[in-house]
Image (spheres, helix red, strand yellow):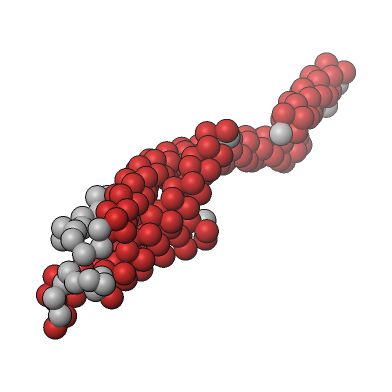
């Protein structure tokens, strides 16, 4: 672009020099009217080049603005995703802890434990994490899905134990639903731990970059 602009300027200088030389060598025979079409052509060419140069500069500035906006948007998305990863890491850690502790309680005394068993942070898993599942790779998404299945099984077992399901909830040997309850808790703990470890790898990889 700069080279084209310089060539136009040089051409105009040379053209001016030719006119001045013609006027100096033959002032009586020089007629400005004879040069008018050529002068007009040079003026039009110069004006067109200036317009083109201005349009090119405007285009470059607009393109830089678009690229900057895209970069800012991508950085914002990365920060939002990282925030969700951090909250998901904490939630899976708490779920794993609560499920593991409850499964130990049920395993230790399967005929006498308190209901309902509450798992903290499952609201976060069922809410924010599940709603933003597309941000996570497939392995994390699968662990989160399996957590929800295990939690559903846990709720079902608790509901049947609480209602008795036609039987006394606490008997010896343990009620079959108590065994299902313990299995759901252990499965929930396993999937939460696996999801937490995978999410922590995402956070570490993002920090390394």
Is residue 75 positioned above or below 144 on the image? above
Q: How many marks?
A: 0
Position of 52 compared to 207: left or right? right
Which residue is nearer to you in this view: 169 or 34? Answer: 169
Residue depicted at x 15% and y 80%: 167
Q: Quadrant of the C terminus?
A: top right
Q: Quadrant of residue 102?
A: bottom left
Outermost residue on the bottom side: it is 166
Q: Quadrant of residue 169?
A: bottom left
> Does residue 115 appear in the picture of this structure?
yes
Position of 43 compared to 78: left or right? right
Residue depicted at x 75% and y 38%: 38
Position of 112 compared to 205: left or right? left
Q: Position of residue 81 (x, y in %)?
A: 42, 45
Q: Position of residue 19 (x, y in %)?
A: 79, 24
Which residue is nearer to you in this view: 175 or 123? Answer: 175
Is residue 56 positioned above or below 11 on the image? below
Is residue 125 positioned above or below 77 on the image? below
Residue depicted at x 71% and y 34%: 1
Position of 35 compared to 142: left or right? right
> Does residue 73 appear in the picture of this structure?
no
Q: Position of residue 164 (x, y in %)?
A: 14, 76
Residue depicted at x 21% and y 64%: 111
Outermost residue on the front side: it is 172
Q: Position of residue 8 (x, y in %)?
A: 74, 31
Q: Quadrant of residue 181?
A: bottom left
Which residue is nearer to you in this view: 59 or 199? Answer: 199
């Amino acid at each position: 672009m700069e080279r084209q602009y310089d060539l136009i300027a040089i051409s105009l200088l040379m053209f001016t020099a030719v006119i001045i030389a013609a006027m100096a060598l033959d002032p009586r025979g020089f007629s400005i009217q004879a040069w008018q079409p050529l002068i007009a052509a040079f003026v039009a060419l110069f004006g067109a080049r200036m317009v083109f140069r201005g349009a090119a500069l405007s285009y470059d500035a607009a393109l830089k603005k678009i690229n900057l906006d895209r970069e800012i948007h991508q950085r914002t998305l990365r920060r939002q995703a990282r925030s969700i990863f951090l909250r998901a890491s904490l939630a899976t850690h708490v779920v794993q802890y609560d499920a593991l502790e409850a499964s130990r309680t049920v395993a230790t005394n399967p005929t006498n434990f308190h209901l309902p068993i509450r798992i903290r942070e499952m609201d976060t898993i069922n809410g924010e994490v599940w709603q933003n599942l597309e941000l996570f790779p497939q392995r994390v998404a699968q662990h989160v899905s399996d957590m929800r299945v295990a939690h559903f099984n846990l709720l079902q077992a608790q509901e049947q134990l609480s209602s008795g399901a036609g039987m006394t909830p606490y008997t010896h040997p343990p009620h079959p639903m108590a065994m299902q309850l313990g299995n759901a808790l252990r499965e929930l703990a396993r999937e939460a731990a696996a999801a937490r470890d995978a999410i922590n790898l995402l956070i570490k990889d993002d920090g390394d970059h």
